[in-house]
Each structure stands twice: as C-alpha cells, then as structure tokens.
Amino acid sequence: MTLYRYIIRRVLLLVPMLVGITLLSFVLSHAVPADPVAANLGEQAAADPAIVAAFKHRWGLDQPLYRQYLVYLWNLAHGDMGTSISTRQPVLLDLRQHLPATIEISVAAMMLSILAGIPLGILAAVNRERPIDQAARVTSLVGVSTPVFWLGLVAILVFYARLGWAPAPGRLSASISPPPFVTGFVLADAVLAHRWDAALDWLRHLLLPAVVLSSYSLGIVTRMMRGSMLEVLGEEYVRTARAKGVPRWALLFRHAARNALIPIITIVGLSFGGLLSGAVVTETVFNWPGLGLYAFSSATSLDFPAIMGTGIVVAAVYIVVNLLVDIAYAFFDPRIRVG
C-alpha cells in the first residue's frame, strides 16, 4: 500500500470517529444527574413553572433526547455548535477565543518535554546504572506519579508566594493591556501590534504552568527514550559499527539515536492528547483562560452546548494529532503502510 493510499484511508476513518464522538459527548453531558434549569436560573426562578417552560423551550430541553441529538448533529454539519447558556454567545465564538490559549500552553509543555526528555533519555541509556541514569529514572518516576493539580499548587506557593520569582496566575499581568485580537495567540498578536511588553509578560506567565503541565509527558518521553535507546544500542549493526571504529558521537547520534526516535513519535502524539486533558486542571489552577477553564465553568453551570462543543474540539484535535503521528510513522517506517 502506497503512502498516499494509507493517508486517504486514515482520513476517511475520521468521519465515523467524529460522529461517534458527538454521540458520546451528547450522552455523557445529558447523563449528569443534575438539573440545568436550577443551575442556570437559580432556585427562586426554577420554582416558577412558566419560567422553567420558557427556559426549556428556548434551549430545546423540552424535546426528546434523540431529537435534540439529531438537531444538534444537523446544526453541527452546518458549522453551528449552538449558543452557550452561560455566556449567551455562540459556542463556536467562545471556542475561538479560548482555544489559542490551550494550544499555547500545550505546545509549550510538549516542546519542554521533547527538548528535555530526549537528551535526558539518551544520557541515561549511555550511562546506564550510573548516577545520571539514576537521576533520570527518578525524574521520570516523579513526573509520572505526581498529580498535576498538586504540583501546580506547590509551584504557585513556592515560586510566586514565597520566592516571588513567578508572576501572579493569569495570561497577562493586570497592568498590561492585551494586544488587539487577531489570531487569538498573544505572542502573534503582540508581534503584529509591536507590543513587545505584552509578549515578554506573556512569556513570563507561560513558563511556570508549561513546566507543571509538562511534568507527566516529560517523564513518559524520558522513560521511553531511555528504553528505546538501550534496545538500539544492543543491536548487531551498532556493535558492528563500534567494532569498525566509528566515532562515539557518530555511533550515538547518526546510528543509534535516529532509530531510537521512531517509537517516540507515537509517544509524543499520545502525550499531546494527555496534555489537552491535563490542561483542564492546569488552566484552572493558574487561571489560564483556555478551553480547560472554559470547560470547568461550563460543567459547573451544566452548559450543555458548551460542554459538548469543548469535548468535540478537544477530541478532534486529539484525533488530528494522532493522524499526523500515524502519517509520520508510516513515512519513517514503510512497514506500517503494508498492513
């Protein structure tokens, strides 16, 4: 099977997967044992039958569930995710405003995991059972085992409250006005508006939550890179190259590390999906105005359209990232295309 046919087949599989995601999001959001009327109107207004009936009719809650889902699916096919009950804005507009912030923190965390985890894994494999290997394994174990919300609270307590090294939680300082909204990404908008003060302030605010969010994926990447590197170093061609007198740096980076990186491609894709889910906790702790914080506020108010919109977007991003990972894997390893 050629690479192009493999890509086309994988893309066509996205359609039933996305439909299944919409059904799962709809069922789970409506399975919550709580009353959205009382959550949004309050107890006094919810006691008035006329107000309750008007509210349910306004948001389509008086229709059978299957009809609500079919209407939602029809509207979604036309680019309409409904209107948020809490913000009274189109859900698509809310997601457009919050998604860039989540991409910022997730991409930054993933870059930190890759830039630190891969070299650390290589060093640990090359220096097996030595102090640097022990330190790398402990770092990996701590990163995988430590809850993100606890690590975030400790980081705020130490670096903001005690040491004063980090700025207050948020995306920008209160004294810095945000740049004009163009792309939604603060760095890009700040550069377009020549607002270097906003760009530097954003970087200062991004560092601590990105480090906290990257703790889990850093542990995974380090552990997998170490294991993959150890496996490659034991291969016959590596021992043959060593016997022929190939320089150590060429042996490690030209022969061993390149082949050891192939399994890391899959780990990076899976870890990125984990970062999207972990961003809900991290954004809430650090008051980062992304999809995580939006999803948290929507869940507390039982905002069904917003909950479903957030779930669909996060799942779609996860699927697209894993599609790119599969394509990259098939590109580097032609055996994948043959199955």
Image (cartoon, rainbow, N blue to C red):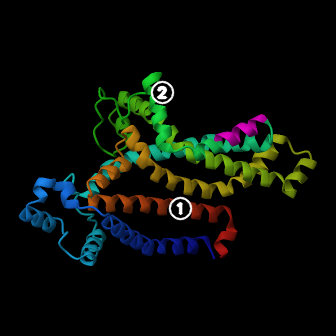
Q: Which residue is mark 2?
A: 159
What secondary structure characterizes most of the magenta part?
Answer: helix
> Which one is in front, 48 or 232?
48
Tell whether 205 sits left or right of 34: right
Where residue 32 appears, as percent x and y from the top left, is 32, 63
Which one is in front, 269 or 169? 169
Q: Residue furthest right?
A: 243
Q: Is residue 313 visible?
A: yes
Amino acid type at mark 2: Phe
Q: Which residues are magenta?
A: 131-139
What amino acid does circle 1 point to? Answer: Asn
Q: Is residue 336 above or below residue 238?
A: below
Quadrant placement of the C terminus: bottom right
Placement of the N terminus among the 4 image quadrants: bottom right
- The picture places residue 322, in percent across and down from the top left corner, at 53, 61
Q: Is residue 89 visible?
A: no
- Outermost residue toward the top in this view: 163
Q: Is residue 96 above or below residue 70?
A: above
* Residue located at (63% from left, 66% from top): 330
Mark 2 and mark 1: span between their CA atoms? Answer: 35 Å
> Badge 1 is on which residue?
322
> In which quarter of the view is residue 203 placed?
top left
Identify the residue at image location x=84%, y=56%.
Answer: 235
Check residue 29 in the rendering and tell me which mark sits there, or answer none: none
Where does the image place residue 277, in percent across and percent down from the top left?
45, 53
Label 1 sits on a secondary structure element that is: helix
Q: Can residue 133 be found in the magenta stretch?
A: yes
- Residue at 73% x, 53% y is 228
